Image: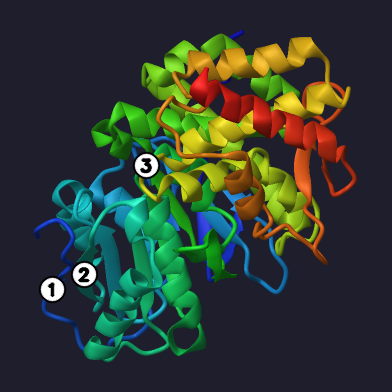
Amino acid sequence: MSFPRLTATALLLSGAAVAVAFSSPRGLPFIGRRQRPARTAAAAVVPLRVAASSTSTQYDIVKVDLADGRDYPIYIGSGFSDDEAAALIRPHVRGNRALIVTNDVVDKWYLDRYTKILEGDGVRVDVIVLPDGEENKTFECMSMILDKALELGLDRRSTFVALGGGVIGDMVGFAAAIYQRGVNFIQVPTTVMAMVDSSVGGKTGVNHPLGKNMVGAFHQPQCVFIDTSNLDTLPDRELKSGISEVVKYGLIRDAPFFEWQAENMGKLIGRDPDATRYAIKRSCENKAEVVKADEKEAGLRATLNLGHTFGHAIETGSGYGTWLHGEGVAIGTCMAATMSEKMGWIDEDLKRRIYDILEHADLPVKLPKDSPMTVDTFNRLMSLDKKVADGQLRLILLRGDLGGCVFTGEFDENAMQETIKEFVAEIDA
């Protein structure tokens, strides 16, 4: 099966509305400022009209439709020039101050470039560099953003810019949600995981020692800017980790997308640019549709967490940073598929296909020999999951044909325990 050719059209930005037609040393923060001389009258950046003839880079726009005029665009392209990127990003900086937050891995690749892109039209840009890694997704680390914003005297018209993967995006979004009771922020994701999932939809937060993402808020960005050429510096392990979230969309709601992935997985892990861009675009379209229908995760949006209840338990129980998020989700997805098959909700053939596609993506499908996970650890950590309601654990499980799933607390408890025991038993096998 081939994948569609991607084209782009002109767009008009006006406030938050978008008209679209589709054809330092590690562990220590660096805090500093990149600034050009400010112009007089530091007013909000005037939205730019970008005509198709003014850019040589083809790109797509996926619109996230929300209530109360909070719609925002996701720009998806590759190899944007600085001027092209500035024309798309800068109109979403509402005031004359911007704070770029990144980590000590991404900074050496992209910080100077995006500082230059954001500067201009009277915008002053400051930066803070945080330590990389899931183990640093803490309230203490996130507080460094708040500390710097206060030291700089940033006001409510300031814009925070998340430049990095899911950890940076989640922390910056949370900081933006609570700083002066809410300021604008922009997502510039640099990993597959962030591009296809965490940068879209407004989920923000930090980890707690007792549970992953247990402290946070819903806070939507002004825009998401995806330049797939930023993946050129992404390690293979992290690229493959992000693919687990791509697979998820096919399993829970988009069977044709799953079939496309099955035929093109070699191209995805081989970094084929057209395949990568299509996978990101289609994932964002799926995510945007779900967020539009259920922004605050009252029901439908929870299905995006396929494999996450098991996976978050693995990440937490193994120690933050031991597993990449997508690796934990891959094992968790296999556990959800196994449990679904045990209850007769899916057939054995579909379960096998799920294992096969994840293995083809070079993702883990079982716990390693040195895993500290036990049955008790799984049960204890899963009981703290955010989807627990009135003491009842609820899971996202597969049901029926490919693309079908349910979010439910009505499942066979014995099947869940058998699944956990089966996966834990493989540690000692």
- Mark 1 or mark 3, which is nearer to you? 3
Nearer to us in this view, 50 or 242 = 242
For marks 1 and 3, give the CA distance: 31 Å
Q: Secondary structure at mark 1?
A: strand
Mark on residue 322? Answer: 3
Between disc 3 and disc 2, whose residue precedes?
2
Q: Is residue 97 above or below residue 172?
A: below
Residue 268 in picture, x, y percent from top left: 45, 20
Residue 406 in picture, x, y percent from top left: 83, 40
Residue underneath mark 1: 32
User: What is the three-letter code of the residue carrying label 2?
Assistant: Val
Q: Is residue 292 above or below residue 368?
A: below
Which residue shows up at 34% across the image and 55% down it?
A: 135
Q: Is residue 17 above or below residue 189?
A: below
Between disc 1 and disc 2, whose residue precedes?
1
User: What is the three-letter code of the residue carrying label 3?
Assistant: Thr
Residue 274 in picture, x, y percent from top left: 44, 22
Q: Secondary structure at mark 3?
A: loop
Which residue shows up at 28% across the image and 76% down it?
A: 144
For marks 3 and 2, give the CA distance: 28 Å
Q: Quadrant of residue 247?
A: top right
Mark on residue 127? Answer: 2
Which class describes the residues within 10 Å of circle 1: few (<14), some (14-19), or many (20+)? few
User: What is the three-letter code of the residue carrying label 1?
Assistant: Gly
Q: Secondary structure at mark 2?
A: strand
